[in-house]
Image (tube, rainbow, N blue to C red):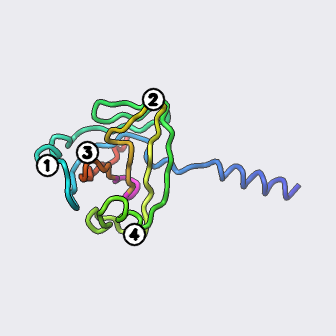
Amino acid sequence: MRYMLILLSILATSGCTNDWYIGEWTVTDAKFPGISAIGVDEASEWFGSKAVYAKSSVSFQGETCSQPQFTVKDVSEAEFHDLYRASFLALEINKSSVEILDVGCPISWTHPGTTMIQVNANVAYIPWDGTFFKLVKDNH
């Protein structure tokens, strides 16, 4: 009986996920750690924009992905630099690794918001064209 309880406990906790990305986020800033196709003026037009991540849909910048599939991976600073040519320091990340969310969609969805980088529970970045848009989670 004891082994049955242990097994059930393991199964119950393994199904739990850390859905840190679920909620409404507001673009508050932009970082340009390297070469960017977006200028400061264009980036500032995004300030105040809302990104909404829910189990049933993801929407940002007028685009929506229905029935999203979320994949979260842990990435070291070296891997991050290889992927984005940016350092943790440039994005004010004070950890040895970050979680990166990738949003899959039944339709081809390659828009801003398909990738989100967690800084902490209330701050994240959306990378797009060499610019990292800083998002702050709305506390509702």
Q: Find the magenta span and give its range.
A: 119-124
- Mark nearest the camera among 3 and 2 is 2
Q: In which quadrant of the rendered view does residue 2 lie?
A: bottom right
Horizontal relation, residue 136 to residue 55: left or right: left
The amino acid pointed to by label 3 is: Val
Q: Amino acid at mark 2?
A: Ser
> Which residue corresponds to the image point at 42% horizontal and 33% vertical from the top-left?
108
Q: CA distance from mark 4 to mark 3?
A: 26 Å
Q: Which numbered marker is on residue 127?
A: none
Q: Residues within 10 Å of mark 4 (few under 14, many from 20)?
A: some
**For residue 6, above or below residue 17:** below
* Kind of residue sitting beneath label 1: Gly
On residue 27, the disc is 3
Kindly identify which residue carries mark 1: 39
Q: Secondary structure at mark 1?
A: loop
> How far separated are the C-alphas under marks 1 and 2?
30 Å
Q: Secondary structure at mark 3?
A: strand
SS class of the residue under badge 2? strand
Q: Secondary structure at mark 4?
A: helix
Image spot of residue 96 (x, y percent): 42, 70
Front disc: 1 or 2:
1
Q: Main secondary structure of the magenta part?
A: strand
Find residue 71 and report its horizontal and vertical position in percent.
Answer: 50, 47
Relative to 101, is 87 on the left or the right? Answer: left
Q: Tell me the residue at 25%/53% (across/down).
A: 130
Q: Nearer the viewer, mark 3 or mark 1?
A: 1
The residue wearing badge 4 is 78
Magenta segment: does it hold 128? no
